[in-house]
Amino acid sequence: MWYIIYAEDVENSLALRIQARPAHLERISALVDLGRILVAGPTPAIDSEDPAEAGFTGSLIIAQFESLLDAKAWAESDPYVTEGVFKSVTVKPFKKVLP
């Protein structure tokens, strides 16, 4: 089943994001290689493709897991969680209808 992983950043997270990003992307790339990512990306702090120093306020991932428990376990071990980028993470089941 698909699951939404929505996370909100701590204030002024850009430096932490930059430091943890390689390990974060490596984990997501592993799911991409398995065909288990529908979409993934950050939420810019301003209305811009490149928010520069404004940074980001969070991230969204929609990925396939065997269960809600598996999705939560995966999210909780993400480098953005373990390195303090995210202040909160919400994981919910998602039913893809369109397209």
Image: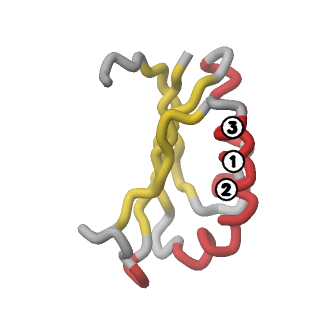
Q: CA distance from mark 2 to mark 3?
A: 10 Å
Counting from the top left corner in percent of width and height, residue 38 is at 50, 34
Q: Which mark is residue 10?
A: none
Mark toward the start of the polypeptide (2 vs 3)? 2
Instruction: Specify the amino acid type for callout 1.
Output: Ser
Frontmost residue, 99 versus 25: 99
Q: Which quarter of the image is occupied by the N terminus?
A: top right
Q: Compared to 5, does 82 lie above or below? A: below
Q: Residue furthest bottom?
A: 53
Q: CA distance from mark 3 to mark 1?
A: 5 Å
Q: Residue furthest left?
A: 47
Q: Which mark is residue 31?
A: 3
Do residues under tags 2 and 1 come within 8 Å of each other at their CB atoms? yes
Q: CA distance from mark 2 to mark 1?
A: 6 Å
Return the residue at label 2: 25
Q: Secondary structure at mark 3?
A: helix
Counting from the top left corner in percent of width and height, residue 30 is at 74, 42
Return the residue at label 1: 29
At 67% from the left and 56% from the top, the residue drawn is 25
Counting from the top left corner in percent of width and height, residue 66 is at 68, 16
Is 65 on the left or on the right of 26, as rendered? left
At 38% from the left and 75% from the top, the residue drawn is 50
Instruction: Specify the amino acid type for callout 3.
Output: Leu
